[in-house]
Image (tube, rainbow, N blue to C red):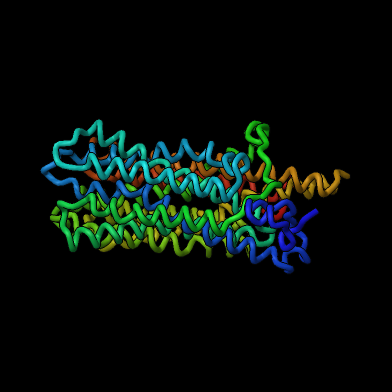
């Protein structure tokens, strides 16, 4: 059998790898680590641009001034729709890697980003109807699907001992697409002005082509990552799937939901402090930037202390952060409001990394139990990989849907009361629930508890 470092010319041209054994230390140290790292780098690049396209409407709504005639509630809809479409697409994107190959699907998923960019470039001008823009914004959801396929792909490349760090870097680099598109939007506002939103869209067209070209030349497909049509069905029967999905709503759902909404929240709740879109844009990128940068740290912390412990502590801190946001809103204190929200972004980033580390750890713990009961360890390890790959897709999709719920909560709160207090109180209660669930399932002393999660 051919190895990663000894491929035939035909295999080299096709970029397929037949033999991949990351848990084998000799194989890994003999070159497997370099191959995995190369795929990680270009996976991050494509996912990064995907996140930028997905969340671009959080910036574009800042350009939609009086000439467009949209109310704040309409603008919240324009951020809810791409979040919803992106969450739905994460399920098929998860299995696309096994069906088409990680490298092949990275190229295809990158090129798909050209569709929403091109359509937005054509229709985004004063006089366009809200229904048209909702459809166009929905097309941007393809950028949200990239995360699931990228994480599933990278999960297959790395050994369990390094998954927390690798998945944290992959996700964190992708998440950085959120503050980057906000910074680019700020640059456009500061230089070209509020009347040129299409310039922001045009900037990303060549970047998408570049990402696709680099993935085509540099990435690989793993033949071992065969599509298992039963994996989704089997993992849905496991109660840990729904526990992890709930926790991921609290971490990633918070991050992406706040990223979509924060600029609008500032403009609606603190109108006098932000008379122009550029005033709000100066602050919107900071939270997503810090939250993205710390995500790998969350993975590293989980590698060292355990994902469940880090996740539980993170949710405790997020509950405190949400309480501070609620206090700041009541006092109409902009400095405290921005500071508390920035803390929430950072904590959601740490929780993103630790929660994703928990996913493979849950099934590895179950595999160890099976091995102790006499099941062949190779068989139990394969089963753990099969189910963890499927759960990454489900948790990613449900977590992204949490971003939809965050924006719906904001929209409803502002419509009914004029402030976001009801939404902040809801977030606080949900974080408390997540603390209790994490402790009860993964930390509470019990003979049934999975060790090492």
Report x, y in % for residue 47: 47, 53
Q: Nearer the viewer, residue 283 or 390?
A: 390
Q: Residue at x 17, y 42 (%)?
A: 125
Count of labels shown?
0
Report x, y in % for residue 416: 24, 35
Q: Residue at x 27, y 52 (%)?
A: 263
Farthest right residue in view: 374
Displayed quadrant of residue 305:
bottom right
Report x, y in % for residue 424: 34, 47
Determine if residue 360 is in view.
yes
Q: In this view, does 422 lie to the left or right of 280?
A: right
Q: In this view, does 227 lie to the left or right of 196?
A: right
Farthest bottom residue in view: 29
Determine if residue 310 is in view.
no
Q: Which of 88 and 427 is in front in this view?
A: 88
Report x, y in % for residue 403: 40, 43
Q: Which of 318 and 388 is in front in this view?
A: 388
Q: Which of 245 and 383 is in front in this view?
A: 383
Q: Residue at x 29, y 60 (%)?
A: 184
Q: In this view, does 426 lie to the left or right of 331?
A: right
Farthest front residue in view: 9
Instruction: Name above or below for residue 416 compared with residue 295.
Output: above
């Amino acid at each position: 059998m051919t190895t990663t470092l000894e491929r035939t010319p035909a295999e080299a041209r096709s970029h397929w790898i037949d033999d991949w054994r990351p848990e084998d230390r000799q194989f890994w140290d003999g070159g497997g680590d370099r191959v995995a790292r190369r795929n990680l780098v270009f996976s991050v690049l494509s996912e990064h641009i995907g996140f930028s396209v997905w969340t671009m409407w959080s910036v574009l709504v800042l350009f939609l001034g009086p000439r467009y005639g949209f109310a704040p509630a309409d603008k919240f809809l324009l951020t809810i729709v791409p979040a919803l479409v992106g969450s739905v697409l994460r399920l098929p994107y998860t299995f696309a890697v096994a069906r088409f190959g990680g490298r092949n699907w990275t190229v295809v998923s990158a090129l798909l980003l050209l569709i929403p960019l091109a359509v937005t470039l054509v229709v985004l001008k004063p006089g366009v109807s809200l229904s048209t823009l909702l459809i166009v914004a929905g097309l941007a959801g393809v950028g949200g699907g990239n995360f699931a396929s990228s994480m599933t792909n990278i999960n297959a490349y790395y050994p369990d001992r390094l998954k927390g760090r690798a998945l944290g870097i992959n996700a964190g680099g992708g998440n950085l697409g959120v503050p980057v598109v906000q910074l680019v939007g700020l640059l456009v506002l500061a230089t070209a002005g509020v009347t040129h939103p299409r310039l922001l869209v045009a900037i990303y067209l060549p970047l998408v082509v570049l990402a696709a070209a680099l993935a085509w030349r540099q990435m690989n497909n793993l033949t071992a990552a065969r599509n298992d049509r039963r994996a989704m069905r089997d993992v849905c029967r496991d109660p840990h799937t729904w526990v992890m999905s709930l926790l991921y709503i609290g971490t990633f759902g918070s991050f992406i939901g706040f990223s979509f909404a924060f600029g609008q929240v500032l403009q609606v709740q603190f109108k006098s402090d932000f008379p122009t879109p550029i005033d709000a844009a100066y602050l919107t990128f900071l939270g997503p930037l810090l939250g993205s940068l710390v995500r790998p740290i969350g993975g590293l912390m989980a590698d060292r202390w355990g994902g469940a412990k880090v996740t539980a502590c993170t949710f405790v801190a997020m509950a405190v952060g949400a309480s501070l946001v609620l206090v700041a809103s009541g006092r109409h204190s902009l400095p405290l409001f921005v500071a508390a929200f920035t803390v929430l972004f950072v904590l959601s980033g740490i929780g993103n990394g630790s929660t994703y580390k928990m996913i493979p750890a849950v099934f590895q713990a179950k595999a160890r139990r099976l091995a102790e009961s006499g099941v062949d360890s190779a068989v139990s390890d394969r089963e753990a990989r099969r189910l963890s790959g499927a759960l990454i897709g489900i948790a990613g999709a449900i977590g992204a849907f949490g971003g939809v719920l965050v924006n719906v909560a904001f929209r409803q709160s502002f419509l009914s009361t004029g402030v976001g207090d009801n939404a902040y109180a809801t977030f606080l209660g949900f974080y408390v629930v997540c603390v209790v669930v994490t402790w009860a399932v993964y930390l509470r002393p019990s003979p049934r508890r999975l060790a090492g999660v």
